[in-house]
Image: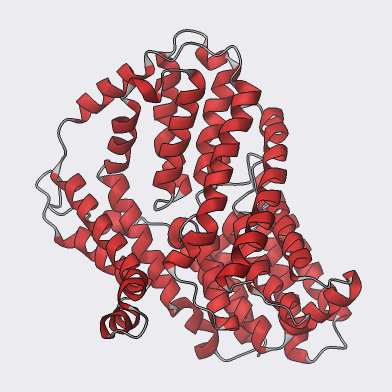
Amino acid sequence: MRRISVSAIGMSLAVVLFLLVFFLCRDLEYPQQITASIFSAVIILWITEALPLAVTALLGATLLVLFGVSDEKKVFSAFGEPTILLFIGSFLLAKGLHISALDRRIAYLLLRYPWASRTPKRLLFTVAVITCSISLFVSNTAVTAMMLPIGLSLLGALGRGAQDSKYAIGMMLVLTWSSSVAVGVIVGTPPNLIAHDHIKNVAGVDITFLQWVAFAMPINIVMLVLSWLVLSFLYGQNAPSTENASNVAKEDLEKMGPLSTSERNALIAFLITLFLWLLPDTSAMILGQESLFAKWSQKHIPPSVASLIGAMLLFLLPAKDTESKRTLSWKQGASIDWGTILLFAGGIALGNAMHETGLAETLGKTITRLFGIESVWVLTAMTTALAILLSELASNTSAAAAIVPMSIGVAQGAGMSPIPPALGAAIGASFGFMLPISTPPNAIVYSSGLVPAREMMRSGFLFDIAGWIVTVVALRVILPPMGLG
C-alpha cells in the first residue's frame, strides 16, 4: 500500500509540475516550452521513482515524439549511440569477471598477505583499495554485493563482538564509499559516460581514455585516501585485533582451488579490452598524431568497439568448468543491467532535445542573469554541488542525466566552456554518501544491519563536502593545462 501511495504521489507531482512549467514558460517558443515541461516531469519521476527509472526514460523520449518536439528517428537514435554499445560491452565484461569469480579471487589474493591486514586501519585501507580497483571496471553495485560477504567474513575472523563494534560500521561504509569514488576511468560509472557523450555531441570535444584518467584518477585517489582517513578517525579507535584476517582470506582462497578456465578467459578478455582502450592514445603518443597506425587505430578502434571485442570473447572462449562450455552464456549475459542502459539512452534523448530546441541556451542565459555567474569555476562549483545533492535523492545515473545537459546549457548560454561544469556534475553525481537510498551500494551495506542510519548520515555528510571540495579544486588545477578548462 505504501509503495502504491508513493507512486501515486510521484505521478501526481510530475503531472502538476508538467502543467506548471508549461504555463510559466508560455513566453518561450513551443518546442522549448514543451521540452522544459517534459524534462521537469521526468526529473520528478526519477527522484520519486514513481515508475522504474528505465520506464521513465522511455516515457520522456516517447513524449518528445508525441508532443512534436522532434521526429521518432531523431529522438530514438539516442538508443543507438556508440556510447550505448560501450555500456553494453563494459557491462558484459563486468558480468564475466563476476560470474567467473575472478573479482573475488583477486580480493582474496591481496587480503591473504599479513602486511595487508596487520592492523585494523591497514585492513580498512586494503579493503578500500581492492574494492575501488575492481569498481573501476565493474559496476559499483556488483562490487559492493561481492565484497559484503568478504567484509562480514573478515569481521567474523576478528572474534566475538567485532560486529557490534564501531569498527564494523567503518568496514561496511568503506565498501560503499570506495566503490562509489571509482571515477578514474570513463567506463567506471554511468555518469562518466553521460558527460563524455554530451561533451562530444554538444561541445565537439572527444575526451580520450587517457585524458579522462589524467584528470579523474587524481580525484579518485584523493577521495579513496580521504575515505580511509575519515573512517579510520571515526571508527578505527579501540578496534579488535585483525591478525587473523589474512588466515580467513587464505582459507577462502584455498576453497576456490586453482584458477579455473572461465577465470582465465575472463582475465584474457579484460586485458585485451584494456589494451585496445589504451592503444589509440598510446600509439599517438609514441608514434605521433600523424602516423598512419595512430590514425587507423583512432578511427577503427573506438572505446565501443574495444569493449564489444572483449565481450564477444567471453562468448567465444571455451570453458570446461561451465554448464554452457563457454566463459559466459547468453542467459548470463542477458542479465546485465538493461534498465541503466535504457535510462542512459533516455537521458541522451532529453539532453539532445534541450540543445536542439535552444532550451539549454535559454536556460543558461536565464540562470546566469539571475545568479550573476561570471566564472566557469563558480558555475562548476554550483553544478557539482547540485549533482551531489540530487544524487542523495536519486540514482547517480539519473542525477547525471538531469544535471549534465543543464550544466552544458548554462555554460553555453553564458559564453563559457561547458566542459568543467559538465565534468563536475558527472563526478559529483557519484558522490552521494549520506542516505541508504542514495546509491545501491549504500543500500547494500545498510541491509547488513551493522550501519545505523544516523552514522551513515553523519559520516556521509562530511564525505559529501570533501567530495565537492576535491572535485572542484582538482578540475580547476588539472583541466586548464590540458586545454579542457
Q: How is the image coloured?
A: secondary structure
x, y percent for residue 90? 37, 61
In the depicted structure, whether residue 38 falls above or below residue 162: below
x, y percent for residue 83? 44, 72
x, y percent for residue 427? 60, 57
Total count of labels: 0
Residue drawn at 72 percent across, 45 percent down? 465
Is 482 displayed left or right of 234 in the figure? left
Q: Which of 84 and 122 lies nearest the eye of the viewer?
A: 122
Q: Which of 100 and 20 lies nearest the eye of the viewer?
A: 100
x, y percent for residue 92? 32, 59
Q: Is residue 60 visible?
A: yes
Instruction: Check the picture and name the quadrant holding the N terminus.
Output: top right
Please identify the quarter of the rendering in which residue 85 is found.
Answer: bottom left
Is 244 displayed left or right of 79 in the figure? left
Residue drawn at 44 percent across, 32 percent down? 127
Please identify the quarter of the rendering in which residue 366 is found.
Answer: bottom right
Q: Which of 196 and 20 lies nearest the eye of the viewer?
A: 196
Q: Is residue 449 visible?
A: no
In the depicted structure, whether residue 223 falls above or below residue 485: above
Among all residues in the image, which is located at the extreme top? 160
Instruction: Check the picture and name the quadrant holding the C terminus.
Output: bottom right
In the depicted structure, whether residue 329 falls above or below residue 225: below
